[in-house]
Image: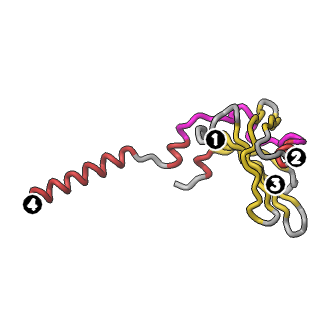
Amino acid sequence: MKKLVFALAFCTLSIFSFSQEFQSGRQKHDGKPTLFSNVASRFAPSQTFISEVMNARLNQTVDLFVTNGLRFKGEVTAISSDAPGLTTVTVQSTDRPGLLLSISRTTLPDQSIVYRGIMISQKHSDMLMMEKDAVTGTYNWNRKQVSHMIAD
């Protein structure tokens, strides 16, 4: 009986101790510093940005003008075509370790082209997503909180 009481007490204390240390995904990301607070919450990519990224070669060093106050310097680490009509270029930052830029081009059956992109860092709580506006058809970078994009 003493062993059972001891085992139950140990389990209770262990569970209580573990539950105090557990943080949700939101709590983990919200505690990180922001990286993109110096740019607008929504802005258009520069005129040449998409073509510069999509025309880059593997292992090429790039210096991309994203918008006023934001440049992305890095090395092209991957160019992939995982599905017909899909090409993705991934660039690792050389200035900020852990910062990643990825732009994808999808050619649809009607031969129209759609781009998607993300700029994200494991060390920061915010990210940029490049999305096409459904109404205007223009592309915009939208600043988002990582914690709002992941499920707990």
Q: Nearer the viewer, mark 1 or mark 4?
A: 1
Task: Identify the residue position indicated by label 1 in the image.
Answer: 121
The amino acid type, in three-letter code, at marker 3 is Tyr
In the rendered structure, which disc, 1 or 2, sits on the residue that comes first in sequence? 2
**Number of numbered markers:** 4
Task: State left or right for residue 18 relative to residue 94.
Answer: left
Dot 1, crowdedness within 10 Å: few (<14), some or many (≥20)? Answer: many
Dot 4, crowdedness within 10 Å: few (<14), some or many (≥20)? Answer: few
Report the disc number at residue 1.
Answer: 4
Q: Which residues are magenta?
A: 30-48
Q: CA distance from mark 2 to mark 4?
A: 73 Å
* Tag 1 and tag 2, C-beta contact below 8 Å: no
Task: Look at 82% across and 63% down and name the residue there.
Answer: 85
The amino acid type, in three-letter code, at marker 2 is Ser
Q: Quadrant of residue 119?
A: top right
Depth check: 146 or 96 in front?
96
Q: Quadrant of residue 135?
A: bottom right
Of helix, strand and loop, which one carries label 1? strand
Task: Identify the residue position indicated by label 3 in the image.
Answer: 115
Can residue 114 be seen at all in this image of the molecule? yes
Dot 2, crowdedness within 10 Å: few (<14), some or many (≥20)? Answer: few
For residue 42: magenta? yes
The amino acid type, in three-letter code, at marker 4 is Met
Task: Look at 62% across and 52% down and name the residue there.
Answer: 149
Of helix, strand and loop, which one carries label 2? helix
In the rendered structure, which disc, 1 or 4, sits on the residue that comes first in sequence? 4
In the rendered structure, which disc, 2 or 3, sits on the residue that comes first in sequence? 2
In the rendered structure, which disc, 4 or 3, sits on the residue that comes first in sequence? 4
Report the disc number at residue 51.
Answer: 2
Q: Quadrant of residue 39?
A: top right
Task: Look at 53% across and 47% down and name the residue there.
Answer: 26
